[in-house]
Image (spheres, rainbow, N blue to C red):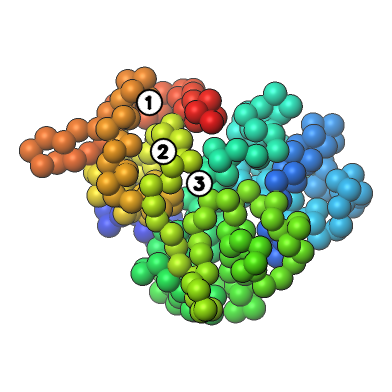
Amino acid sequence: MQSFLFLNTSVVSPLPSLTFSGHETFALRSNWLKKAFDVLLEIPDLFHREDAFVLLGVGKNMAQSIRYWGRVCGVFERTPDGSSYAITWLGRKLLADNGWDPFLATPAASWLLHWQIAARPEAAFTWYYTFNLLKGGEFTSSELVQQILSFLAEIGYRSPSEATLKRDVECMLNCYLPPAARKQQDDEDMALCPLTSLNLIQLLPGQNRCRLVSGSQESLPDALIAYAILSMLRTSGRNTVAFSDLAYAPRSPGRVFRLEEDELLHRLQRLHEVTKGHAYYTDQAGIRQVAWPDVEEPNVAEFLLDCAFQEM
């Protein structure tokens, strides 16, 4: 198995299984995860039943798409024996009737789901590549397809067909572009995708080109940035991370959230307060970094997400 670079030039990890299909070209819809959550509470083998689409009240392809989105968002996971899907701790905290945001109506929910999808290469690789590895920030759909195919060939990974990857890119764009800029599907349904409100991808006026949009991301909670930093450190197995990596490395809050450098620095200066002393930003002798002495301390991730939704 080839090695694959995920964080920076000094961190190499095994290449996971990459996903390029499963959504059936349907963008995520705000009520889908809650709908599946409620049924899974009563019927754990929901996604292995032939009548899953009946139980969910959707078409067959939509039922498969809901299973895909639950997995890539990290709210459902396949059980070890493969016989069913279980609700994760994140799914329970987010989607329960008294959860953070069962119907994904807040900016915090949209940013969290974006992080879950785009910061994990094993979740939905087209999303991961676009927000973490794409150079330049401007692209056409066909250019993105070819760049991903070239990248996969470079790392020795068996590529999907060009047609499969084209559908994957189209679905990714349909999640983020406003309804008027989309090429297919019902606008009324697609407008319900919680990722659209983030305004992270725009269609350039008068062109068939898209661009990634960076900014201050005012709707992004400080505590969610802290959660992203914690996730990044846990993935790398480290307790410190340089500011440059937080701003520009793959799987970083700067890249995934498209945060401008000055804004990221401003947010990091509040990190000690936001994390209640668990982490802090330092700038000594020209070395800018974040230190998180105990990244494996239990319950900290849940605490940070609690705070993120309380900020709303």
Mark 2 touching mark 1, by CB under 8 A?
A: yes
Quarter holding the N terminus?
Answer: bottom left
Q: Label 2 sits on what residue type?
A: Ile
Numbered label attached to residue 115? 3
Secondary structure of the residue carrying tag 2 is: helix
Precedes in sequence: disc 2 or disc 1:
2
Q: Residue 140: x percent and y percent?
A: 50, 76
Q: Is residue 108 above or below residue 258?
A: above
The answer to whether 286 appears left or right of 81 in the picture is left
Mark 3 touching mark 2, by CB under 8 A?
A: no
Q: Is residue 282 visible?
A: yes
The answer to whether 34 appears left or right of 167 in the picture is right
Mark 3 touching mark 1, by CB under 8 A?
A: no
Callout in the foreground (3, 1): 1
Q: CA distance from mark 3 to mark 1?
A: 19 Å
Outermost residue, front side: 205
Determine crowd level at label 2: few under 14, some 14-19, many 20+ residues with C-alpha closer than 10 A: many
Q: Residue 93: x percent and y percent?
A: 63, 28
Q: Which residue is mark 2?
A: 225
Q: Is residue 189 above or below residue 104?
A: below
Q: Label 1 sits on what residue type?
A: Val
Secondary structure of the residue carrying tag 1 is: helix
Q: Residue at x 60, y 72 (%)?
A: 165
Q: Which residue is mark 1?
A: 274
Q: CA distance from mark 2 to mark 1?
A: 10 Å
